[in-house]
Amino acid sequence: MTHALAYPIPSAVGNIDAYIQAANRYPMLTETEEIRLAERFHNDGDVEAARQLVLSHLRLVISIARGYLGYGLPHADLIQEGNIGLMKAVKRFDQTRGVRLVSFAMHWIKAEIHEYILKNWRLVKVATTKAQRKLFFNLRSQKSSYEGIDTLNGTQAAEVASRLGVKQSEVVEMETRLTGRDLALEGSPDDSDEVFAPIDYLADSRYEPTRVLENKALARLQNEGLQEALGALDPRSRRIIETRWLHDGEASTLHDLADEFGVSAERIRQIEVKALQKMKGVLVAA
């Protein structure tokens, strides 16, 4: 295996193109190499192994960070935040779960970048165009003509918009940006257990890697249970259940199956009900 130690550690500070070129020179790991390095890190505390895992996935961070350039934040800053997420992923990575680090790390990289964007969202979006910057610098002086007013009402916003030559909606939007206060994503150490910070409800736990693995395992168990329940049915009952409930396209009607088996539609319905009851008994027993 080519050791990452043979390459200099790139820095995102400075020339971003040079950083990207340096990061792309790190060799990608095979699954066997990845498992061996993860075992060295978690079992033996080998920091060099963790370093190689991080360096071999820098190109992943660059790729993900590039997708967030539309927020107006520096690419280098996005990469730095993503690298923090990558290091967190390496620390939490469990090589025994049968998942490659590249898949596991995507969640943590995106989580760090998302948090960074949210923290800087108000600063970025206050004034991003020439017209918005002009409105930004003039709105405060225009509001001063309304003594004792913190927030403009509809009539006042219309008057300011007319004087500045902009839309009323633009005045309202800019005032909202200027008067809005920043919120900490994470709570303070003094908060009680009953207090929830924004980070608690902004995070989507459905895509947390451990939850994804648990859901896959549950789906596999449910599929095995379904196959066992279907195996307890006679061929005709199984055919009816599969075409009525487990179809990929349009489900068969009772009359379609009645014609197929040469019985009445009511008889097909009775067989279906009995088959479902039998399958339920098998699933409960399992």
Image (tube, rainbow, N blue to C red):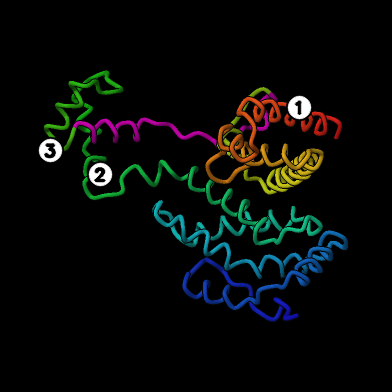
Q: Which residue is mark 3?
A: 165
Q: Are marks 3 and 2 in contact (CB under 8 Å)?
A: no
Which quarter shows the C terminus? top right
* Residue type for callout 3: Gly
In the picture as drawn, the residue positioned furthest to the top comes out as: 148
> Which residue is depicted at the point 67% across and 37% down?
241
The Cα–Cα distance between marks 3 and 2, rounded to whole angstroms, is: 12 Å
**Residue 12 makes an appearance in the image:** yes
**Nearer to me, 125 or 89:** 89
Say what secondary structure mark 3 lies in: loop
* Label whose residue precedes the other's in the sequence (3 or 1): 3
Write the start and end of the magenta stretch as one range: 168-193
Q: Is residue 207 left or right of residue 155?
A: right
Q: Nearer the viewer, mark 2 or mark 1?
A: 1
> Which residue is depicted at the point 77% across and 68% down?
49
**Nearer to me, 141 or 29:** 29
Instruction: Tell me if mark 2 has few (under 14), some (14-19) or many (20+) residues whose alpha carbon lies within 10 angstroms of its own.
Output: some
Say what secondary structure mark 1 lies in: helix
The Cα–Cα distance between marks 2 and 1, rounded to whole angstroms, is: 66 Å
Q: Is residue 49 left or right of residue 16?
A: right
Q: Which residue is mark 2?
A: 132
* 153 lies above or below 113: above
